[in-house]
């Protein structure tokens, strides 16, 4: 990234130089005085006096050293007096295309050639035709109704579009502000392929152009009542006169009418083909009429039907067809006001100037939004321009994602050994696919993997240089002079997201340059920054700055020098006073800021303080003196005082005139939260669990990324212009770690044996690190993680290898983390951290000339894991970047798989980090107990418990500590449950109420009505939703609920689901006389006793022996002879035919799911009607009924058991 100095006038620059000369002269004078003083002191025989003067001299030196931690006071006064930072006018023209730029946008060594417009002359597009006169007057603001036109421009555009634009639009009703077009998810387009509307529908889209103009305007007005009828008719005239697609519809309608007039009672079968696909010979087909974009084709002609992107047919039935974003007609169909002539938008046949490459959609869009002297209809489009920009970026991103998706079908990853095995199989003619599919890569900017990798890279900088000292956030000010000066007449900043993005990028560069290169806060050791976009689209930059050790901000006096949390006096600083009031005052709080208790989530107002103080953790409490008066903000009349001021640096605030929050990072104890916040990136789940005929888990990161992202206009412009989303001071080299012959090798899906062999010969960073140590003895002084600092991995003579760096850069190596569960790989990583200069995998596990059997053995021999040091090291390393829940998971993995000698020491050392998320919510020792309980729960899921580690502290007073697996906002969760319950239809509610009533009665000792409840229903009836609601409602009634399924996949569909085998200790294999491994008075037995309701999903997948063992176990544990020991068991999806039917291909013992005794305890509840269907019919008599009443032996297979009705009842005793 190019660093740019802050622009100063010649007079200001001269003043800076003068002050620097004065400072140098003063330093020289002081040096002379100090030398004379020391010389005089050296001649003094009085040792005590000499020592005193030496001490005074040292104090003076220390004072001056501290002064160098800060920006020179003279410069500080100068910058306080200078005017606002100004980029300059946009007057630099591109030598290739004439686009106008700011001087700060120049690319180094390229002169007046720019990438943001024409790609340094590589792109040259034909200008769009001049707009029709009336439409141009509307866009230019000279038409008397231009204001109404711009106010509803999106409605006017959609009224005359030929296809529909479909997206989930984000509404901003709860917060005032400028208009912002923002979408959530993906965009798609549809076109009605029927030429005429059906009798029950009004004409729409292209159908409106084949009826009378006034009638068409009335139809449009009905759907857009806010629009002006006169403007509707004006635009209709423009479209009918100029648009080629209108002429195409009219051409087909005329051809139909002509054929009807020539042939009575004849309904011609004609098709209107839009944009024939490449390679179609027009002379081959029977085209009745053609123009430049369409052809009328007769389906009665001989020969094949020609292929086109979209076909309009002569029919009256509405038929919507999805339109591909690759269709060259998409843009003129969706944006007729931008393309009134029907000019084609981007298409794949546009070539670069050198004709060697195609013009990408991103390059096309950049060219179109560049500012030139000629009129640009896009830049004048205001709200429609926002939509077009978002739409364009979504299509660009879709192209890139499709590239990833299509190439992943061809690109596969496999281990080295796997490919060797594959070659051997091929030799035996056993061909097949190799490897696993690769998903959305970390190279895709903004993807979850990309942000996670950047986060871990940033934490690598923290490990090397320590925690950051400053957290700076700068938000774009839409009133900046550079934006206002370049708006077109009548425009606001929100109308020009392209301009906002360009100006903010330059301002951000200036801020980074000032802080990093000009040492505004002192010499910088490291930094990272990330660009984010507010809900309404304005960009802001989060910057974390680490200062050198001698420059740290450690005292309240230093904090006051840099940070203020007060409103300056208007008489002394009128400009700064207004900037602080306008940009740095928090409030008034709205729904976006208030907690459930209706208090400010940012804890404003703060308390008045006469001076800045810092607690023992370095947390600063900024000075907020009571001015004895309040201030009124001019923009909205909001009354405030110093308690509402956001901390800031006055110099930066005055220089950049916007919101710039500056905080001391020592106020945040765990720095990983700050970095996680900065690199939170795209908020999307990685796994979608979908249910069909067979339960499946679908892992589609690409679809998740598309469907859950939000895109606003400024972000779209930022991404189209390819501005950086993040940057850091150090380049991080990510180092793979793999076992011998286990490295990933990437190959094409259709590769041949030679290509596979070539892939096998490619060196990895680790393998060539060994080779480097063999060919270059100097490299042996470095460990694997430090080698990138001195060597670079690049291609030389056709292959990649480590070569010595010619120039030194800020480079840090980071080995990918490895779980301790991967025992050998984990210990190989330990060796790579400690052993310098190994020559091979065998060499690194050779200790004192003896080759060890494993990497773990080598670690033991070297004393690296003779105690728990490595587990502490692993926890220390993970603590920096892992969230507490992830850290607890790692702790459990270490306990189970690594068997530390002193686990209690691990707990004691890391208990604060393990409970950090709970500490933010709970007081006292409750946070530790919460973390402890969750650790125990995680161990329980693996068949372990804390009690198996007797040296661990055995916390016993857990009565008031719930067994949470997540921190939940209980009130919010309860509100969500109520909403879920309210959304159930009447039949589903009755089932839920029925079960809740039975669950409430379970506590009655005299209650002997206990049963196994079976819930069934057809697909789509909302069974899963009902289960989720039921689970939550039971939890709100303080019921302990155990959810389980026979298979692990089915268990993942349930909240906190577990397998039946894990829950009840079922043996494998399972026989009729099998018993549970759970013994009475054990932790597992106590857990089962504490459960009130068991929910078993997909029960038919289990053999009958499983249910009988469970039933027997619960009776034994509770010493209760009621079925299932008196517990409530809810079973889902046991079709009646299956309850009584046999299991195919099973032996006689496995045939029947349940015995007659267990069937006697079953109550059947059938879910009928779809969820949210609005069906409020009364529950019929069969909704909750005996199984016998639903029996239909005709539907059973011949080999079935029929249980007579008398053995089946709702609440039978056994």
Image: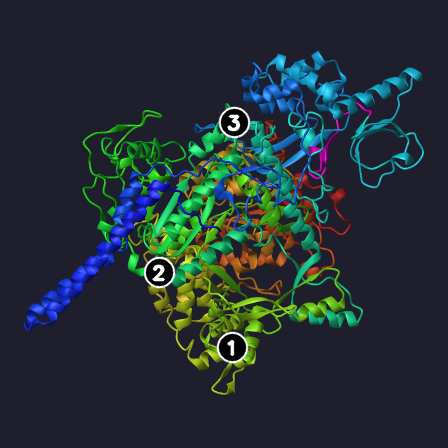
Q: Quadrant of residue 163?
A: top right
Indicate which label's residue lies in the foreground, 2 or 3: 3
Whether residue 333 is situated above or below residue 132 in the rendered picture:
below
Q: Which residue is mark 3?
A: 488
- Looking at the image, which is closer to me, 829 or 152? 152
Q: Alpha carbon of mark 3 to alpha carbon of mark 1: how far? A: 68 Å
Image: magenta residue range: 314-330
Mark 1 closeness class: few <14, some 14–19, many ≥20 residues within 10 Å? many
Indicate which label's residue lies in the foreground, 2 or 1: 1
Whether residue 22 is situated above or below residue 801 in the rendered picture:
above
**Who's the residue at 46% across and 65% down the image?**
808
**Who's the residue at 22% across and 54% down the image?**
26
- x, y percentage for residue 386? 56, 32
Residue 961 in sight from this viewpoint: no
**Who's the residue at 18% across and 62% down the image?**
32
Q: Element under label 3?
A: loop
Q: Which residue is mark 1?
A: 855
Q: Alpha carbon of mark 2 to alpha carbon of mark 3: how far? A: 60 Å
Q: Element under label 1?
A: helix
- Looking at the image, which is closer to me, 1113 or 828? 828
Q: What label sits on residue 911 in the rendered view?
A: 2
Whether residue 189 is situated above or below residue 439 in the rendered picture:
above
Mark 2 closeness class: few <14, some 14–19, many ≥20 residues within 10 Å? some
Way the structure is coloured: rainbow
Residue 522 in sight from this viewpoint: yes
Q: Quadrant of residue 231?
A: top right
Mark 3 closeness class: few <14, some 14–19, many ≥20 residues within 10 Å? some
How many numbered marks appear? Answer: 3
């Amino acid at each position: 990234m190019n660093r740019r100095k802050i622009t100063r006038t010649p007079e200001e620059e001269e003043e800076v130089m003068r002050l620097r000369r004065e400072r140098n002269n003063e330093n020289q004078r002081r040096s002379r005085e100090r030398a004379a003083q020391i010389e005089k002191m050296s001649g003094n025989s009085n040792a005590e006096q000499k020592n005193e003067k030496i001490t005074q001299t040292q104090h003076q030196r220390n004072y001056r050293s501290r002064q160098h931690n800060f920006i020179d006071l003279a410069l500080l006064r100068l910058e306080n007096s200078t005017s606002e930072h100004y980029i300059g006018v946009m007057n630099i023209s591109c030598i290739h295309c004439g686009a106008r730029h700011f001087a700060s946008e120049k690319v180094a060594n390229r002169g007046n050639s720019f990438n943001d417009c024409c790609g340094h002359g590589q792109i040259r597009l034909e200008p769009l035709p001049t707009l029709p006169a009336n439409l141009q007057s509307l866009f230019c603001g000279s038409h008397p109704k231009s204001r109404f036109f711009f106010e509803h421009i999106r409605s006017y555009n959609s009224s005359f579009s030929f296809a529909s634009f479909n997206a989930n639009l984000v509404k901003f009703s709860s917060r005032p502000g400028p208009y912002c077009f923002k979408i959530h998810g993906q965009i798609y387009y549809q076109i009605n392929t029927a030429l005429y509307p059906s009798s029950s529908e009004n004409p729409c889209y292209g159908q409106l152009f084949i009826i009378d103009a006034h009638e068409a305007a009335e139809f449009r007005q009905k759907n857009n009542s806010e629009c002006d009828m006169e403007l509707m008719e004006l635009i209709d005239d423009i479209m009918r006169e100029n648009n080629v697609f209108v002429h195409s519809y009219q051409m087909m309608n005329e051809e139909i009418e002509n054929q009807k007039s020539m042939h009575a009672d004849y309904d011609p079968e004609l098709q209107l083909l839009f944009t024939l696909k490449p390679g179609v010979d027009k002379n081959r087909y029977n085209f009745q009429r053609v123009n430049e974009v369409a052809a009328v084709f007769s389906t009665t002609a001989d020969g094949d039907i020609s292929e086109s992107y979209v076909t309009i047919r002569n029919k009256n039935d509405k038929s919507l067809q999805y339109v591909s974003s690759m269709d060259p007609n998409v843009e003129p169909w969706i944006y007729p006001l931008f393309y009134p002539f029907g000019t084609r938008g981007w298409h794949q046949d546009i070539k670069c100037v050198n004709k060697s490459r195609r013009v990408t959609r991103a390059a096309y869009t950049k060219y179109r939004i560049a500012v030139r002297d000629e009129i640009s209809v896009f830049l004048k489009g205001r709200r429609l321009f926002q939509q077009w920009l978002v739409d364009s970026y979504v299509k660009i991103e879709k192209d890139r994602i499709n590239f990833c998706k299509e190439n992943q079908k061809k690109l596969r990853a496999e281990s080295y050994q796997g490919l060797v095995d594959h070659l051997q199989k091929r030799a035996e003619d056993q061909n097949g696919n190799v490897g696993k599919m690769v998903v959305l890569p970390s190279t895709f900017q903004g993807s979850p993997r990309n942000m996670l990798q950047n986060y871990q890279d940033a934490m690598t900088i923290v490990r090397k240089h320590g925690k950051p000292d400053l957290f700076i956030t700068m938000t774009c000010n839409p009133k900046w002079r550079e934006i206002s000066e370049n708006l077109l007449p009548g425009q606001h900043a929100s109308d020009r997201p392209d301009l906002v993005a360009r100006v903010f990028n330059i301002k951000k560069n200036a801020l980074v340059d000032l802080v990093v290169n000009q040492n505004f806060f002192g010499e910088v050791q490291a930094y990272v920054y990330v660009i984010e976009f507010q809900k309404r689209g304005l960009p802001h930059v989060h910057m974390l700055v680490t200062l050198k050790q001698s420059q740290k901000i450690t005292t309240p006096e230093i904090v006051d020098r840099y940070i203020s949390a007060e409103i300056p006096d208007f008489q002394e600083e009128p400009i700064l006073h207004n900037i602080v009031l306008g940009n740095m005052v928090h409030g008034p709080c709205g729904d976006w800021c208030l907690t459930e208790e209706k208090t400010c989530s940012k804890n404003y107002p703060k308390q008045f303080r006469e001076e800045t103080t810092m607690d023992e953790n370095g947390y600063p409490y900024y000075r907020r003196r009571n001015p004895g008066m309040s201030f009124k903000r001019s923009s909205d009349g909001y009354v405030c005082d110093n308690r509402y001021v956001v901390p800031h640096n006055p110099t930066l605030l005055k220089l950049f005139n916007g919101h710039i929050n500056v905080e001391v990072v020592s106020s945040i104890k765990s720095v990983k939260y700050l970095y996680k916040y900065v690199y939170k990136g795209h908020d999307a789940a990685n796994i979608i669990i979908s249910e069909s005929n067979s339960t499946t888990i679908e892992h589609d990161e690409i679809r998740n990324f598309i469907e859950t992202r939000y895109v606003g206009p400024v972000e779209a412009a930022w991404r189209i212009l390819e501005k950086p989303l993040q940057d850091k001071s150090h380049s991080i080299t990510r180092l793979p770690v793999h076992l011998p012959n286990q490295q990933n090798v990437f190959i094409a899906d259709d590769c041949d044996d030679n290509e596979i062999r070539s892939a096998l010969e490619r060196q990895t960073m680790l393998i060539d690190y060994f080779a480097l140590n063999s060919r270059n003895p100097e490299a042996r002084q470095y460990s694997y993680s430090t080698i990138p600092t001195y060597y670079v991995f690049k291609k030389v003579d056709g292959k990649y290898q480590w070569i010595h760096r010619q120039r030194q850069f800020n480079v840090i190596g980071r080995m990918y983390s490895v779980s301790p569960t991967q025992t050998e790989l984990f210990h190989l990583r330990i060796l790579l951290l400690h052993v310098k200069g190994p020559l091979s995998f065998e060499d690194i596990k050779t200790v004192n000339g003896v080759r060890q059997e494993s990497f773990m053995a080598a670690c033991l021999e070297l004393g690296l894991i003779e105690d728990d040091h490595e587990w502490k090291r692993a926890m220390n390393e993970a603590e920096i970047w892992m969230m507490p829940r992830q850290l607890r998971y790692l702790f459990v993995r270490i306990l189970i798989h690594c068997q530390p000698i002193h686990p209690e020491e691990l707990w004691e050392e890391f208990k604060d980090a393990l409970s950090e998320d709970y500490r933010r919510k709970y007081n006292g020792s409750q946070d530790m107990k919460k973390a402890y309980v969750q650790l125990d729960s995680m161990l329980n899921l693996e068949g372990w418990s804390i009690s198996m580690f007797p040296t661990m502290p055995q916390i016993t007073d857990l009565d008031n500590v719930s067994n949470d697996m997540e921190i939940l906002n209980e009130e919010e969760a309860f509100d969500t449950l109520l909403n879920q319950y309210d959304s159930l239809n009447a039949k589903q509610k009755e089932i839920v109420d029925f079960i809740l009533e039975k669950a409430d009665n379970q506590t009655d000792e005299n209650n002997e009505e206990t049963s196994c409840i079976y819930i069934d229903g057809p697909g789509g009836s909302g069974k899963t939703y009902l289960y989720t609601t039921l689970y939550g409602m039971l939890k709100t009634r303080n019921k302990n609920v155990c959810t389980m399924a026979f298979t692990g996949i089915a268990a993942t569909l349930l909240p906190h689901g577990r397998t039946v085998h894990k829950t009840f200790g079922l043996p494998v294999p399972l026989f009729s006389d099998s018993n549970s491994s759970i013994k009475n008075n054990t932790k597992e037995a106590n857990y089962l006793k504490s459960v009130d309701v068991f929910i078993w999903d997909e029960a038919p997948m289990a053999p009958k022996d499983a249910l009988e063992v469970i039933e027997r176990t619960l009776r034994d544990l509770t010493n209760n002879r009621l079925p299932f020991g008196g517990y409530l068991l809810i079973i889902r999806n046991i079709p009646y035919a299956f309850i009584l039917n046999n299991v195919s291909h099973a032996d006689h013992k496995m045939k029947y799911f349940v015995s007659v005794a267990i069937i006697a305890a079953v109550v059947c509840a059938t879910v009928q009607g779809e969820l949210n269907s609005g069906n409020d019919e009364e529950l019929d008599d069969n909704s909750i009924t005996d199984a016998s009443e639903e029996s239909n032996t005709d539907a059973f297979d011949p080999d079935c058991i029929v249980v007579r009705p008398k053995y089946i009842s709702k609440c039978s005793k056994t």
